[in-house]
Each structure stands twice: as structure tokens, then as C-alpha cells.
Amino acid sequence: MTEPESASANQSQSELINEEDPDACLEHDSFGAEQIAAATELSGFEDDGEADEDLFEELERLRESGFATVDEDDADDGGGGLGGGSETAWRIDLETALLDDECDFGTVRNICRGRAVPGHLRAQVWSICLGAASGGARAASLLDEFDGLFDLPEQAELRAACRDFVRDWDAGGGEGGVAMQSDLESMLTHYCKLTGRKFLSVVRALLQLPQQPPQQQQPSTRALFPMFSALLTKYTPRPEPACHVFRLLLQYHEPALSSLLDSLRLPVADFASDWMAGLLARDLATEVLHPLWDMYFLLADPFLLLFISLVFVVNCKESLLAPDVDAESVRRMLSTTPSALGVADVADLCTLAQHYACRTPASLRTLFTAALFGDAEPDADLLMALCLPVTVAEVTRDPPFTLVDVRSPDMYNRGHLAGAYNLDSGLLLSRPTEFDSALAAVVRTANGPLCVSGHGRKEEDTTTVLVAAQLLRRLCPGVSIFPGEDDEEDETEELVSVSTWQRDALSSYPCSLLLGDDNQQTPGHLIIREQHMYLLRLCPKQPGMAAIVVRRPLVKVVKITSKKRLPEFITFKYGDTDKDGVTHLTDMDRVVIPKAGEATKDVKMQIIKLLGGVSPQQ
């Protein structure tokens, strides 16, 4: 059994602090140095002016692997290397590899190692990174299904947008521009019909695709469509849920900035929606956009855009927190922040983005991938989350945060996750002063990210949300919430200590639970108490801990059956008896109990005791 731990228990402190000069780690600090300073505030609640050792180790590690510096001469010709140096051997290797029809993403990634792709090879590399090369035949064939009808409700607006885009692209007004406009409108019309997406976000995303001067051979629509479709499918998030997730990230890492935006009533969508919908294509010059997208595709992380956006906001922190700022000036400042990015800053930008990504619970990707990149409607509960939610898998697998268990001391002592603090949420309403002192002790002792954990049942977790809100009011960074498993088949699950429950039980039997429609076997325990029977499912990653799968009143057991050929296979049937004496079955549990005879006898004897001599059928 895990021993109860108080809020004042000794816990490991946050990361060690490095006293080196932050700027000494950066070749290009015009954009990155300010963000390095801001990033040092991540691991603590007070800024002591020292640098975060983990961040600089990450910078050095990424530099050594090639994701670090820009050769200015290379950057000028669009074919430079973020991996640094004037070596050209890797470019020759890349050109040679691309001549092979079997060239795949792994080959390209290993050769480029984070360097900016040479301009004349970019279209091929992007096509491979996006998977358009392998799936191109199918995607291109979709164009053959185009009905040739330009009849979208917004067709006139779409045509005007294509005309404006091509006019800017083809300043010379050549014939290539006319052909490009026709191809664009055909492609976008067909894509909108296929996916139901509004065309404006499609046009914005199109801006980042590799372009060629009009005098060169034009990329055909058939060649462009697979890359275009793959880009939108894999890397373009839905703007509305993306902005919500971005707000959760900002609140998690920089609660002071998030609170400022809330106080100014400035939604993040006011400045970040174009970043999400257009993948920064409208905000960056082409010579900056292309190497940024090179790294984006080579890292193959669709969520990188959110962390890049976070770095943009953090870079403005000092100005944002200045006195007398107003909503319009903040919106204008943040909207124009990406335009300050230079080619030499791309590597540090991506490194900082990866730094924040490493400091963010992995549950972000598990919970929000479908909402950002899927076709189904996003989960309304996720979009209304007060703070960043985490999954049970992350909570039970060496979590990167300190758990704050807000259940009552009695429930906490019955069983809890290792290392969890107990903060009785009942004090929040009954004795608020005592609660404030206990909360302050938890924050002071943990000195790092905090995850608020409750009962795992919505109807009982209102106070869990209130505790999380109290932490957010204190501007504590790294606040997340563990709402528990909200599974339709298992809404009463909580973690308990097996040894404690066995000690308090009338009898206990190891068994295998048969769960789900496919009767999947899961190791567990049958626990018999005076009034109830419990089925516990063992937690493989938390030895000695189990989850309560079902809690059944013994008086509801109406029948116990076993299979003739497998007497260990037991079925407990539950029901209610109406006023006419007719029994109606309401539920059943199936278990495999090695000592089935003893277990069923104990259950029957306890039922007889409760019912005064009336036994269930066998």
C-alpha cells in the first residue's frame, strides 16, 4: 500500500539551474535570445535571472544533430543548411537519393538532418515528406472525378481570390499566370467539393507551396494536387479548435500572458487564427517561410505550429506585460510578431518550439489530434476544458508533474497514486482559509507542474475544477487536470490499494474479468464486503493498485451460474423484483475464478445473511 503523503512531504525539486550566460549558447540571438530568457521562467514560480540548464542542453543536442545554425551564403540562394557549415557533400547525396524512385522520407530526413533544402530540390523533398509521392497516383486520379462544374455557393469569391493570388504571383502578366489561375480554381473547387472545407483556409495554405517563376515550366495541376491535398490533411489544423488548444498551451506555460489576454477580452483567434489556417504563409517572407517549412516537414510534427506560435507570443512577453497596454495594441503587436523573423532565426525558433513541446504533457497529442486534424466533430468537453487535460495513461506512467489528489483524506488513504499530495477539496467551501494555506504549501513544496486529480466522475468532480481554477488564479505555470476515465462502460473507476481492500474484505479471490463485447480477460480480484461485491481490475503499471470496475449491492444478485465444462466460469446476474414478484434482469458480470466453489459459497452465504434466509438461484 502506498503510504499517505502530506503536502509538506519531501519531493524532488525542479530542474537544476545553470549559471552560464544564456547568450553564450546562441550564434543568432536577434530573435532567439529574448525567448531564451522567457523560457527560463518555465520551471519555476519566480525568475531568479539564471538560465534553464535543460533548455541549453537541448539547444546543444539539437545543434550537434544538425538543427541549429544557418549558413548565410546558403540562405541567400534558398538552398542553405540549417545544419551549418559550407559542406556540399550532403547536397550531392540528396540529389543522388532523389534520383532513386525508392527514395523515402527516412532517407531524406537522414541526409538533410534539419538543413534547409536546396531550392531546386524542394518540390521533390516536400512531396516525399508529405507522402504525396507514394500516394500521388490516387490523389491525382481524384482530379479525373472533377465534374467540371464551378458551382460552389462561394464560387465568385473563390474565383476572385484565385485571380488576386495569381496576379501577385505573376507580376509580369504572362500566359503562365492565366493557366495557373485556371488550374488553381479547378483544384480548389474540386477539393472543396471533396472535403466540404471552405476555400479561404485552403487558399491561405496554398501560399506556402513551392512556386516557380512563370518563365519556367509550370507544375501541372495533376502533380500539384497530391501535395496540396496531403499538406492540408496532415498539417493544416482546423483554425477554431487549434486556437482553443493554443490558448490551453499558453495558459499552461505562460499563465500571466494568458490572464492578460483574458483581462483584455482578447481571444487568441484575433491574432492567431491566420497563423493556424495559413501555416504562417501570409506572415513570413518566402525566404524565411521555405526553410521553416523544410524543418516542419522533416520533423514531421503537425503540432509544431502550435509551439512555434507559443514562442512568438513569449517573445513579446516583456512588452505585453508593460503597464497601460490595451487590447488593440496587443492584438497589433502579436499579429505582426512573425514578420520580425529572419532566416538566421529559424533554427532557434524551431529549437525553442521543441523545447516547449518536450515540457508539455504528451496527452495533448493523444486528446487533440482528432479534433485538429480529423473529420469528425471535436469533443465539446475538450473544447470547453478549463485547463490542459491529461489521460490516465500519462498519469500512471512516470508523469512529468506532481499529482494533487483532491479527494477526501479517507478516500485518499484507501488508495492513491504514488507521489500524490492530498488536498481535500471539501475545505474549499467549508474552511477556505485552511484550504488556502494547504494549497500554498502544495505549490511551495512541489515547485513545478501540478496535475489536479479528482474522483474520475463528472458529478463529483466540480470541486476538482474549482481547485484547478484556484491554481490558475495564482498564475501557477504547468497546471493540468486529470478528469479520470470517462468511459461509458466504466464510469465509477478509481484506483485503490489491493492489500488494503483485501484486509478490509470478508473474503477476496483472484480472478480474471471478462470485459467488453469480446470478453477480453483482464487480471483482477473479487472482493466481498458486508453489503457489496466489488470487481477490481489490476493496474499493470502500478503494482499493488487496482481500478474499481463495478460495485454491486449483494441484495441485487438474483442468480449465479457456471458452465458445466468450465466450472470456474461464473456469471453473476443482477435484477429488481416488481410489486407482482416478477424479477427483471438489469445487468450481469462474467468472471473466471480459480476457486469458484468457495467464492460463490461466500457470496451466497452473505446474501442469505442480508435477506434473512432467502438465497439466490444457482
Image (cartoon, rainbow, N blue to C red):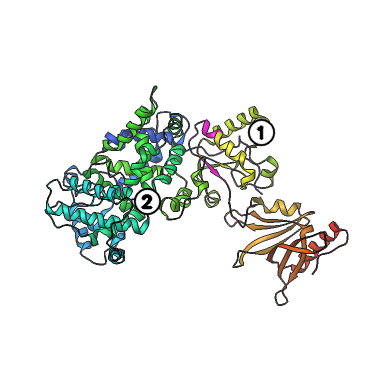
Q: Position of residue 113 (x, y in %)?
A: 28, 52
Side of 409 relative to 173 (left or right) = right
Q: Residue furthest bottom?
A: 565
Q: Position of residue 227 (x, y in %)?
A: 28, 58
Let me know if residue 58 appears in the view.
no
Magenta residue span:
470-489
Depicted 23 relative to depicted 405: above or below? above
Quarter the C terminus occupies: bottom right
- Residue underneath mark 2: 302
- Residue at x 44%, y 52% (from the top left corner): 369
Label whose residue precedes the other's in the sequence (2 or 1): 2
Side of 301 relative to 44 (left or right) = left
Depicted 110 relative to depicted 441: above or below? below
Let me know if residue 336 appears in the view.
yes
Comparing 193 with 234, the one in front is: 193
Q: Which mark is residue 273?
A: none
Q: Is residue 494 magenta?
A: no
Q: Amino acid at mark 2?
A: Pro
Comparing 319 with 277, the one in front is: 277
- Residue at x 32%, y 54% (from the top left corner): 152
Q: Position of residue 266 (x, y in %)?
A: 41, 33
Q: Residue furthest top?
A: 324
Q: Amino acid at mark 1?
A: Leu
- Residue underneath mark 1: 427
